[in-house]
Image (cartoon, rainbow, N blue to C red):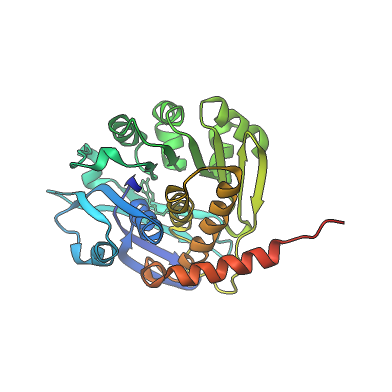
């Protein structure tokens, strides 16, 4: 079993009330791969420029992530810069520079098309579609997106949504895409385009899932110190899909476990800037926090 992820590999400049870091490792594919590789084999497809410090990805290589699909192109690496205020649920994007992503066309190395799971991380929906078309046989496919693409590439995004099993978005992005304030109505609208399930991220309030079995909700892990919420969504997706990839069957039970595991992994990510927490994360720490989650969400019948 293995997962293929296509997404951004970035240099991020992030400012929160707790500090500022300039041009540090980031990108949707990096956060996802760091999280998912704690559960299963991961293959990554992306592009960086000749200015990218490739040694920053050694920790992924050490975890067995297959980086043969990472192209190095002439030019500058994708850069994103954002700011968070005390309400860490709201991301203020200050700048997005696509740079080498502007001319990127993913080419899958040998073996990449045979994966069991495909994750189309937040990136240009046209690129997501190029990869989706090259991996027709995946057992499970999921995609993420953000306001940048909802506003800029709505038609391509709608086509892409119709080609996956699960869609994940932040709640504000779902409202923007679906044009409704109701998450129930928004999730229904997305499912009418084809996907079986919609997973809505609610930042420090957790995540909810709508599928044909109904509704499941999980809180976020209560953290006293959230330093940098960047990458929470991608590491949530990495925990969620990483676990499902190595499950024999995808059932209502494993989907619920996956939602909690996604929340657990994301809770580590946001405790530190950039990839710092994910670099040191271990399956044992994940299991311990998963157990805590069970304890604080269990309610007895009355
Ligand atoms: P999130 O999990 O949503 O916080 O994802 C944060 C990551 O997404 C950052 O590391 C950024 O580099 C990356 N990112 C931000 N905007 C974009 C974009 N328009 N396309 C691709 N990746 C992006």
Please tell me which residue is depicted at 21% across the width and 40% down the height of the picture: 108
Q: Is residue 65 above or below residue 245?
A: below
Q: Is residue 112 found left or right of 13 in the rendered image?
A: left
**Which of the pair 102/40 is nearer the observer?**
40
Which of the pair 267/152 is nearer the observer? 267
Q: Is residue 7 left or right of residue 294?
A: left
Q: Is residue 6 visible?
A: no
Q: Quadrant of residue 277?
A: bottom left
Residue at image coords 18%, 42%: 109
Q: Residue at x 28, y 49 (%)?
A: 44
Percent x, y for residue 137? 34, 32
Q: Where residue 6 sits in the image (x, y, percent)?
A: 32, 44
Q: Is residue 219 left or right of residue 105?
A: right
Could you say which is closer to the camera, residue 14 or residue 69? 69
Image quadrant occupied by the C terminus: bottom right
Q: Estimate the x, y position of residue 70 in percent, counting from the top left.
A: 21, 50
> Would you say residue 175 is visible in this rendering?
yes
């Amino acid at each position: 079993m293995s997962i293929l992820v296509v997404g951004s590999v970035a240099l991020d400049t992030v400012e929160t009330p707790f500090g500022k870091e300039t041009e540090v490792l980031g990108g949707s594919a990096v956060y996802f791969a760091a999280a998912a590789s704690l559960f299963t084999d991961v293959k990554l497809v992306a592009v960086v420029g000749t200015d990218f410090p490739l040694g920053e990805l050694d920790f992924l290589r050490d975890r067995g992530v297959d980086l043969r699909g990472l192209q190095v192109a002439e030019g500058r690496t994708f850069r994103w810069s954002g700011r968070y205020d005390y309400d860490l649920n709201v991301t203020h994007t200050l700048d997005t520079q696509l740079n080498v992503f502007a001319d990127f066309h993913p080419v899958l190395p040998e073996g990449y098309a045979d994966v069991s799971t495909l994750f189309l991380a937040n990136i240009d929906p046209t690129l997501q579609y190029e990869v989706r078309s090259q991996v027709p046989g995946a057992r499970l496919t999921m995609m993420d997106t953000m306001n940048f693409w909802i506003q800029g590439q709505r038609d391509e995004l709608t086509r892409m949504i119709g080609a996956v099993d699960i869609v994940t978005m932040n709640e504000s992005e779902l409202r923007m895409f679906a044009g409704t304030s109701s998450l129930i109505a928004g999730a229904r609208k997305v499912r009418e385009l084809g996907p079986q399930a919609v997973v809505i991220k609610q930042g420090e309030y957790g995540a909810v899932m709508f599928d044909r079995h109904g509704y499941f909700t999980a809180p976020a892990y209560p953290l006293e110190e959230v330093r940098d919420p960047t990458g929470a969504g991608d590491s949530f997706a990495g925990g969620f899909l990483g676990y499902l990839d190595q499950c024999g069957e995808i059932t209502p039970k494993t989907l619920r476990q996956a939602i909690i595991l996604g929340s657990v992994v994301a809770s580590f990510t946001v405790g530190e800037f950039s990839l710092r927490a994910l670099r040191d994360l271990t399956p044992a720490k994940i299991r311990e926090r998963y157990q805590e989650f069970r304890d604080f969400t269990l309610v007895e019948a009355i």
